[in-house]
Amino acid sequence: MDFFRNKALSLCASFSFLLVSIFIVATSSTPPQSDNWLYDAAGDCSGVREISDYRAKCAYVRSSSGCSNGYLNYLEIFYCVCGDSPAAGYLCLLLWMSVLFYVLGNTTSEYFCPSVESLSRVLRLSPTIAGTTLLPLGNGANDVFSSVIAFTGSGDADVGLSSVLGGAFFISCFVVGVVSIAISSRGVKVDRASFVRDVLFFLFVLCCVIAINIFGRINFWFSLCFFSVYFLYIALVSVMQFLRRKEVGSGQVLDDVEVPLLDHVDEHNKSSVSDSVSDESWCRRCIVLFVYVVELPVSLPRRLTIPDVRDENWSKLFAVASATLAPMLIGALCIKQSFALLLASIVVGILLGAASLALTKGAGPPKRWVLPWLAGCFLMSVTWTYITVQELVSLLVAFGNILGINPAILGVTVLAWGNSLGDLISSLAMALKGGADGAQVAISGCYAGPLFNTLVGLGFSLVLASLKVYPEGYDVPNDSDVYETVGFLMGGLLWALVILPKRNMQLDKSLGIGLLAIYLCFLFVRILKTVGILQFVS
């Protein structure tokens, strides 16, 4: 009885803490809404490195609004709170960075991947379809939003174009390379037809990007056609899947779909629990309790806002709380657009909470109307990933200002890595935990994701930008670095297109090492250009 009383008290305390956190988020400055803030932050705070006294640095970062780009002002923490002790400042920021990386990885593995697997099973999607629809939709939301703002809001279209292409290059080269090396010993093979289709489609899209950059102007109708190519891609994927299902037989395909991608993870967890119970000691209990208490501040806010209908994690109390608080959290994040939206989200949250309280049972998760719960889990895991990645990028930019790293290097590394960290972690987790189907989803997502970001993110941005100047054409910035990025990106795609068929479509180290080498060469060239050694390349 005491256990349940303590659990209820802990839950109430955490519930209150989350409400206060939502209020603080809603009433404080929100993170920037475009990629342009990376360069603004680096530019506005560049003078802090020329100041020697930490008190003057503290006054500088407090007086400059561009030095604070996240929910926390990391430069103020470093120069004001830990001003006379730089070592403590570095330690504090590194510890917080590790927390953000943990939250990002844990959210992906515990919520995002299971929601993708469950949605693909409920919707009867094959691993290939799931990898080309659900995975890019979740991982690409941040890139699409940033690209739209860069083209239509900040006026820095070159920033939006560079971020989309940089992220696409990182995913299709670095992420695929890491995944290939990580599962090289398992002998996993990917579907030949799906892989060739994705790579050829991607090469076609990159040719369109080069054409747009060469002409330097695009009208509304051409931008609409470019945007519509993604729907043509989805239609082709669906037709290929339909023909395959017709050839093989619907029964076998449905059996493949209904096998959970992460099924063996649950078995591993169950065996781990039984082992821990059998040899549990007093010391072990103390360690487990300590870890639980330490993890509580970062786990409970997500548990209270992300719906989870898995049997082993089901709790009606948490289900009602997540249905109530999830809309409120989204409303708090969008308060900069409209305060009325926050009020509407509160009303929606109360209604959803009341409905879940009346329609769910404490004995187990709902058997009917599961799709809305899974969609909510998917949406909120994407939301938490977005929040964490934006804060992580803000922290990395602060490190760049502290260490005096050139903003151009930050743009080619931090921006692409920050926007694509979710892709790296989710794809790697899916490949490692999901077996052969998980690897297929991961690889499909690594090509469908950049396709989604380029066609939907860049395409939709061009549609909106050209619509604003209709019937005139929209002037696209002619950046020579675009040709360089696209050239290396095509090189990575062609390498994979040659190596994989030769290896009988098996993901191995030769593919991974080659892709990583291409990406590192790209970074090396960009860094040399940044420091002025290869200025003649431009």
Image (cartoon, rainbow, N blue to C red):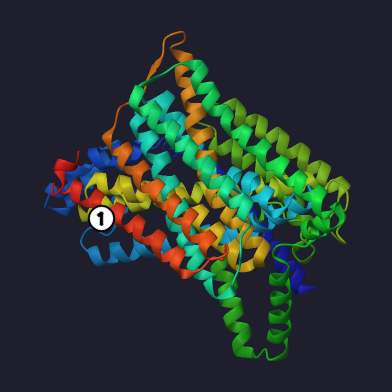
Q: Whole-percent x and y of residue 457?
A: 50, 34
User: In the image, is 240 to the left or to the right of 389?
Assistant: right
Circle 1: is it few (<14), some (14-19), or many (20+) Cα within 10 Å? few
User: In the image, is 488 to the left or to the right of 139?
Assistant: left
Residue displayed at 76% across by 60% down: 310
| Residue 206 visible to the viewer | yes
Comparing 157 with 483, the one in front is 483
Q: Which residue is mark 1?
A: 524
- Quarter-of-image position of residue 482: top left
Looking at the rendered image, the quarter that the C terminus falls into is top left
Residue displayed at 29% across by 56% down: 521
Q: Say what amino acid the circle numbered 1 marks.
A: Phe
Q: How many marks?
A: 1
Comparing 412 with 283, the one in front is 412
Compared with 229, 390 (above or below) is below
User: In the image, is 6 to the left or to the right of 316?
Assistant: left
Q: Whole-percent x and y of residue 62?
A: 27, 42
Residue displayed at 61% across by 49% down: 135
Q: Whole-percent x and y of residue 241?
A: 73, 46
Compared with 478, 240 (above or below) is below
Comparing 208 with 401, the one in front is 208
Looking at the rendered image, the quarter that the N terminus falls into is bottom right
- Furthest residue toward front: 502
Q: Whole-percent x and y of residue 424?
A: 49, 57
User: In the image, is 260 to the left or to the right of 204?
Assistant: right
Compared with 364, 472 (above or below) is above
- Quarter-of-image position of residue 294: bottom right
The secondary element bearing badge 1 is classed as helix
Comparing 98 with 296, the one in front is 98
